[in-house]
């Protein structure tokens, strides 16, 4: 089978599954893309199919329901490893499949159980592409310790720094994908884009440095807008309201000044004497004196957004495009080596073709199709905010 395996990585609730959902949606629906590849979702498990369509519904609901409110998001975590597969069919009916394995960010927390870490390592061994999803508001608005803890930067660094121990020397791609980043990357906001890049580069410097030492590794920075019109508004300390007499009892909320409170759905009212605000225990990521508690991130709908098209993801399709580019570049490089060496021994190129199950004919059609995609100008890079590191 001609399949490339991709692993989603990132802290809990940072938006991995939603980003995949928008990516699948665009790939399937975009006419220009489907003139080059016929795209289908061949995810073969019901949970997976439902998980992605639920995430799209969740995003669309937020966009209609919360108009003119300031709200927070924190719904339906992923519970187990699920694989979602996109099939891209070329004109001569050869296929390339991208299989994205997704899991709850829980497994990347610093104190995950040994068995959970073992399971992650097993997945890593089985993949050539790794997507490190970055929750941009925590990167931009919090101190480095909180950003590290929320985005699980240290545990992910530990997992990836020895990436070449498995399948030694085989080419791999690591993509860093900031999301929920609309506020900083929208349109002509060059300063925002620059700040996002600077903060990212600083926060992930240890991992980037470790990965740069490795051979056959490509690093890419690719901000994605999962929703397109939901903008970061502010960070607030995380509270739960206790007041058995009141309908807000048990709701997540924040303080607004000394007198007012706002609930997760954006309703605002005056705090009464019976209201008790307790720190949200679920928001504690690291316990103890030097612990970290994750503040809540609040969002609003972009006031300049086109009301008819509030759900308007951007650049999500760039992720599969760049994965395919990496894939075809790798094959081309290995083939060139084979030509240069002109040796009989089975080359990397042949081994790679064998392992991923791609025939020479498929290879030829694949390279032609990617040339068409590149020539069509649909693949973005710098200065669109996407860059190789
Ligand atoms: N504002 C905003 N919210 C988003 C975006 N993407 C996802 N969310 C919300 O963020 C929450 C977490 O998103 P998920 O996609 O479930 O995140 P995840 O990383 O898969 O979470 P786990 O599986 O628990 O690790 C959900 O409530 C989403 O609706 C986005 O681009 N902008
Ligand atoms: Mg998830």
Image: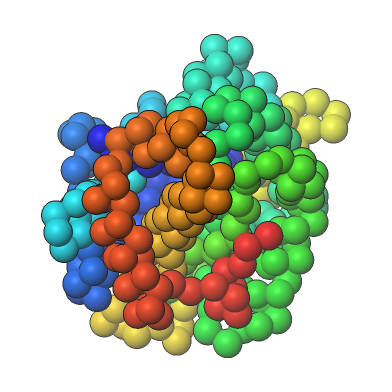
Q: Is residue 341 above or below residue 105?
A: below
| Quadrant the C terminus occupies | bottom right
Q: Is residue 208 left or right of residue 83?
A: right
- Give residue 27's quadrant in the image: bottom left
In this orientation, does residue 293 appear? Answer: no
Q: Position of residue 337 (x, y in %)?
A: 54, 48
Between residue 93 and residue 144, name the one nearer to us. Answer: 93
Q: Is residue 241 left or right of residue 95?
A: right
Count the labels in the image. Answer: 0
What is the residue that sits farthest to the top in this orientation?
A: 115
Q: Position of residue 314 (x, y in %)?
A: 42, 71
Write the residue at 49% across / 50% down: 339
What is the residue that sits farthest to the right in this orientation?
A: 289
Q: Is residue 352 left or right of residue 309?
A: right
Between residue 308 and residue 259, name the one nearer to us. Answer: 308
Write the residue at 57% across / 69% down: 386
Between residue 302 and residue 94, name the one nearer to us. Answer: 94
Q: Is residue 112 above or below residue 299?
A: above
Render colour scheme: rainbow
Write the residue at 55% across / 64% down: 223
In this orientation, does residue 169 appear? Answer: yes
- Give residue 384's quadrant in the image: bottom right
- Give residue 56's quadrant in the image: bottom left
Write the residue at 46% across / 55% down: 332
Q: Position of residue 32 (x, y in %)?
A: 24, 75
| Quadrant the N terminus occupies | top left
Q: Is residue 376 left or right of residue 193?
A: left
Q: Is residue 211 above or below residue 388?
A: above
Q: Position of residue 288 (x, y in %)?
A: 80, 26
């Amino acid at each position: 089978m001609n399949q490339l395996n991709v692993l989603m990585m990132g802290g809990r609730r940072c938006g991995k599954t939603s980003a995949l959902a928008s990516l699948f949606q665009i790939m399937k629906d975009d006419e220009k893309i489907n003139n080059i590849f016929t795209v289908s979702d061949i995810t073969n498990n019901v949970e997976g199919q439902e998980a992605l369509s639920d995430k799209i519904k969740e995003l669309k609901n937020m966009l209609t329901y919360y108009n003119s409110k300031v709200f927070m998001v924190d719904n339906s975590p992923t519970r187990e490893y699920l694989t979602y597969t996109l099939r891209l069919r070329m004109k001569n009916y050869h296929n390339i499949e991208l299989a994205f394995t997704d899991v709850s960010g829980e497994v990347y927390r610093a104190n995950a159980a040994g068995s959970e870490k073992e399971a992650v390592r097993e997945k890593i061994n089985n993949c050539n592409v790794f997507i490190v999803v970055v929750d941009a508001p925590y990167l931009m608005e919090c101190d480095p310790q909180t950003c590290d803890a929320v985005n699980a930067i240290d545990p992910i660094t530990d997992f990836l720094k020895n990436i070449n121990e498995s399948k030694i020397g085989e080419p791999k791609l690591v993509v860093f994908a900031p999301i929920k980043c609309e506020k900083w990357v929208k349109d002509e906001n060059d300063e925002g884009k620059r700040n996002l890049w600077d903060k990212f580069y600083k926060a992930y410097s240890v991992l980037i440095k470790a990965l740069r030492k490795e051979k056959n590794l490509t690093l890419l920075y690719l901000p994605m807008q999962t929703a397109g019109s939901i903008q970061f508004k502010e960070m607030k300390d995380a509270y739960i309201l206790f007041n058995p007499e009141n309908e807000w009892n048990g709701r997540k909320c924040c303080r607004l000044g000394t007198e007012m409170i706002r609930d997760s759905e954006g309703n605002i009212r005056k705090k009464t004497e019976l209201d008790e605000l307790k720190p949200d225990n679920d928001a504690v990521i690291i316990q103890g004196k030097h612990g970290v508690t994750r503040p809540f991130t609040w969002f609003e709908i972009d006031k300049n957004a086109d009301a008819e098209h509030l759900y308007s993801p951007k650049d999500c399709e760039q992720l599969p495009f760049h994965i395919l580019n990496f894939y075809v570049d790798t094959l081309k490089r290995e083939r060139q080596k084979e030509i240069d060496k002109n040796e009989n021994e089975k080359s990397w190129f042949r081994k790679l073709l064998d392992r991923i199950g791609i025939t020479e004919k498929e290879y030829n059609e694949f390279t032609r199709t990617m040339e068409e995609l590149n020539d069509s100008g649909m693949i973005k890079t710098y200065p669109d905010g996407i860059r190789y590191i």
